[in-house]
Amino acid sequence: MSALTAADSRGDRLDWDDLVRMWEETNGPQGCKVEVIEGLVTVSPPPANAHNHIANLLHRRLYRVIPDEWGIYRTQVLAVPSRRGLYVPDLVVLPEALLLESSGHYVPAAAAELVIEITSKDNAHHDRIKKAAGYARAGVPLYLLVDRWAPGRPTITLYGEPKGDVYCLLHAGKFGDPVPLPEPFGFTLETDGFPAPL
């Protein structure tokens, strides 16, 4: 992963519009993810096969329970101006109408019903700390962290009830454990079949 500090030629911090413009003008290699995390433009390589497999399993399982007017998106950018962030989560559940009503390349993170991040080895700290704080600050009600690279063994953590930059812990378990998702989902998410790192 590489990062580019978002500052102008004088070294001053860019305002939100300039930060967005810098992000829009950053051309990452094909398949790479370009995000802004705490004012830094970051470029991450494409995820590993196991990472994509987990995203696919989650995608299929969630589609069974969400309302028809919601969608599950894999490359949707979420804006968190208060944390100087433009995040691209692995999965996000949003009202479909929001995308149809919005022009541009991002939507407010506050509109998300659920955000899911699946850690990659080189940038897991972003998902665990920086992006978690950003999602909480934006008021995203549920944040599911699938941490393939957690110390000891892979874990699944569900956060909710955001206050400021902090979430309450709603569930913590390991791969294979069921995760109870509260309303508006109201079902138990099975995590069997999630591959651990080799």
Image: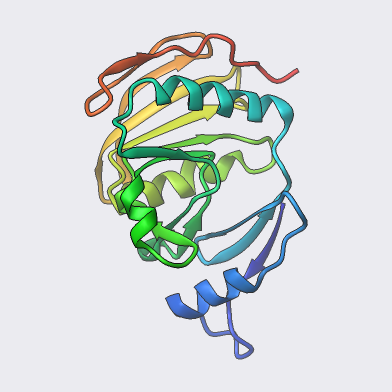
Residue depicted at 73% across the width and 47% down the height: 45
**x and y percent of residue 123 in the render?**
63, 43
Instruction: Report which quarter residue 99 is drawn in.
Output: bottom left
**x and y percent of residue 8 in the render?**
59, 85
Residue depicted at 70% across the width and 20% down the height: 197
Q: Is residue 167 left or right of residue 107?
A: left
Residue depicted at 37% across the width and 63% down the height: 102
User: According to the image, what is the colour scheme of the structure?
Assistant: rainbow
Question: Residue 40, relative to residue 114: is it above or below?
Answer: below
In the picture, which quadrant includes the C terminus? top right
**x and y percent of residue 26 in the render?**
67, 69
Residue 143 appears anywhere in the view: yes
Q: Is residue 138 left or right of residue 150?
A: left
Question: Residue 53, relative to residue 35: is it above or below?
Answer: above
Instruction: Report which quarter residue 114 is drawn in.
Output: top left
Residue depicted at 77% across the width and 57% down the height: 29
Residue 14 appears anywhere in the view: no
Q: How many marks?
A: 0
**x and y percent of residue 89 in the render?**
51, 44
Question: Residue 7, relative to residue 43: is it above or below?
Answer: below
- Along the viewing direction, whichever of 22 and 107 lies nearer the viewer: 107
